Image (cartoon, helix red, strand yellow):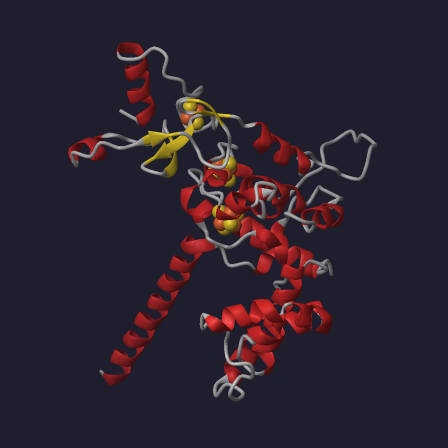
Amino acid sequence: MTLLDVLDLIKDRVDGTLSYRKSCRMMICGSCGMRMDGAAVLACKTRMQPIVSAGHVPTISAMGNLPILKDLVVDMAPFWGKIRAMKPWLQPGYDELREKERIVSQQQMNVINKEALCIMCGCCVSECNSMEADPEFLGPAALAKGFRFVGDARDAAAVERLEDYNSEHGIWDCTRCYFCNERCPKGVDPRDAIAKLGAESIKEGIDHDMGAKHANWFVTSAKTTGWLRETELVPKTQGIIAAIQQTGFALALAKHGKVPPPVPPHVAKDVTQARALYDLVKAQGVDGALGIVQGEHALSRIEFEQESKERERELELEQVVE
Ligand code: SF4
Ligand code: SF4
Ligand code: FES
């Protein structure tokens, strides 16, 4: 039995007034998003057997960051409004019809493979820290939808879209908490999609947002001295006047021991490694979205590959010794 089956049972036998949404019962329609013990889940994907076996009685509640209408039903209007703001339709830049279809290669479609899996359930939005602080933030689902079109080889409006997504409440307001990746039931990894949008923006020279300027400054500071020189962040990205205006804030941070030393003690001993890394990334020529390393699954693959390589080296050594 899934959580959805249990809710059906409760509605049927215990309380007919219990309200929740459902449709497909097979993780496709995205209707049954809700929270179990404070974390967003799809009710039709959540199996109850292990929970019951553990003797645990879970708390079921409505999704977060959206107004509750009744019981487990939330008002999805703000969610759909943000999806609509992304212009979620192809803008191919041509009108004429052809006799035959336009072929898109599998390789080109692979770029947006993950983002196209979104079923718009809202589980990521429910857990978004940034949206909790700023309800106007476009949020993980809408931004993942945005990359689904920015990365589409058939779309001719990518730059225009990136300009839109770089405005206030846009991509740079994400706090990178990764809860959206953690809770998405379909493996869309919306935080990765946001990182790809950021990388595409920088590639297209759309770096007027403070977040983009910060990212650029961190690259420069890591490359030149090997340090992330946060103290210089404000004067370098916002200018001297803004830096002076923020003196009071800086002093308050200093009082709580949250300001790094004003000048890094020296150029980092292994700065050549940071520079070599920078050169390596440049030489690979995978700028923009293609240069984004994807979430934990990708990292675990890298770890696995490293382990395999180390094991290969050990075997080679053993053979040499023999
Ligand atoms: S990104 Fe994942 S969690 Fe968010 S709406 Fe799409 S499927 Fe649901
Ligand atoms: S990583 Fe960004 S978009 Fe995802 S939940 Fe955290 S703040 Fe929201
Ligand atoms: S009922 Fe459709 S996703 Fe759960």
Which percent across, then down, holds residue 202? 68, 60
Which percent across, then down, holds residue 271? 52, 84
- What residue is drawn where x is 44% and y is 38%? 186
Looking at the image, is 119 positioned above or below residue 112? above
Towards the viewer: 191 or 187: 191
- What residue is drawn where x is 66% and y is 33%? 84
- What residue is drawn where x is 69% and y is 34%? 89
Q: In this orientation, does residue 113 appear?
A: no
Looking at the image, is 151 positioned above or below residue 35? below
Where's ligand 3: which quadrant? top left
Looking at the image, is 207 positioned above or below residue 37? below
Q: Does residue 36 appear left or right of residue 240 in this picture?
A: left
Q: Does residue 75 appear left or right of residue 285 in this picture?
A: left
Q: In the picture, residue 256 is in which quadrant? A: bottom left
Q: Does residue 283 appear left or right of residue 182 in this picture?
A: right
Q: In the picture, residue 13 is in which quadrant? A: top left
Q: Residue furthest right?
A: 96
Q: In this orientation, does residue 60 appear?
A: yes
Which percent across, then down, holds residue 158? 72, 47
Towards the viewer: 23 or 131: 131
Which percent across, then down, holds residue 267? 54, 87
- What residue is drawn where x is 42% and y is 26%? 32
Towards the viewer: 190 or 230: 230
| Total residue callouts | 0
Q: Looking at the figure, which quarter contains the N terminus?
A: top left
Q: Looking at the figure, which quarter contains the C terminus?
A: bottom left
